[in-house]
Amino acid sequence: MPPHPLPALSLLECRVLGVLIEKQHTVPGTYPLSLNALVAGCNQKSSRDPVLNATESEVQSAVDQLKYLSLAMEGSGNRVTRYEHNSGRVLQLPSQSVALLATLMLRGAQTPGELRINCERLYKFSDISSVEVFLNELRERVAGALVAELPRTPGSRENRWVHLLCGVPATEMVSVAVETTPGADVTVSELAALKANVARLEDEVAQLKATMSNLCKALGVAQLQ
């Protein structure tokens, strides 16, 4: 019996899920992950696109939603609650497909060649053609496509692929059959990206205000409201 289609995940929910999958392979000694480790993984500057600045409460909310969807669950721990993913079982996917999805969730659109390199710590594909086999399986999945192939950009030799867990990406053409509603303004993936950018900008503004406040105190001048 094929799995039921999932509702579209938010950008942060995908990031949390990707981190759980990644860290299971890269730091098995500390997996399942504590909330603090999960926040650090979500806000990691390297191997992430886009770079986020999520708070602990935001990550906890994302974890709770993933638990509701059975994509994540509480793992064994002593005094600290720890979390692990359950994506392979819920989505009924082999480890190769889970590795590809995680890499797309963490790093954004990539070519099969880039995916082969970036997946190496999660699953070592023998060649690019084997990556393409699993990408095509994810695209032709009975319960609904989980990846899509983007149109080739000028000068590139390979097409890039994206995951669809956040919904269909806002591109001019995507090689996946999707019903669109005339007059639709913004897609789910666009909203997720916009929210992430707004959160980042709000954090930068807060940091600037704090710096300005400290400068005003040091100079003994009144701070402008």
Image: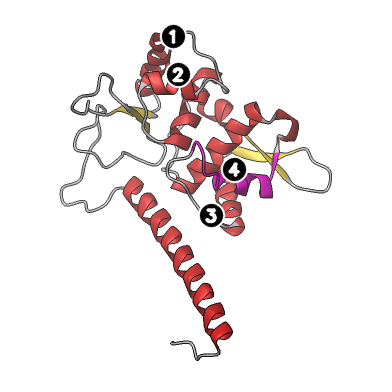
**10 Å neighbourhood of mark 4: few (<14), some, or many (≥20)?**
many
Identify the disc placed on residue 59: none
Relative side of 120 to 110, left or right: right
In the image, which disc is placed on residue 41?
Answer: 4
* Residue type at numbered disc 2: Arg
Residue tagged by mark 2?
Answer: 116
- Check contact, mark 2 vs mark 1: CB within 8 A: yes
Of the residues under marks 2 and 4, which one precedes in the sequence?
Answer: 4
**Which residue range is magenta in the image?**
33-47
Residue for badge 1: 127
Residue 146 within the magenta-colored segment of the rendering = no
Looking at the rendered structure, the kind of residue marked 4 is: Gly
Q: Are marks 1 and 3 in contact (CB under 8 Å)?
A: no
Q: Quadrant of the C terminus?
A: bottom left
Q: Going 51% across and 28% down the picture, which residue do you hit?
A: 91
Give amino acid for label 1: Asp
Q: Say few, some or many: other residues with alpha carbon within 10 Å of mark 1 (under 14 / 14 to 19 / 20 or more).
A: few
Residue 188 placement (x, y as % from top left)? 34, 48
- Residues under labels 1 and 4: Cα distance? 28 Å
Circle nearer the N terminus (2, 1) = 2
Tell whether position 35 is magenta: yes
For marks 3 and 2, the one nearer the N-term is: 3
Residue 54 numbered tag: 3
Q: CA–CA distance between discs 3 and 4? A: 10 Å
Which residue is depicted at the point 66% across and 39% down? 73
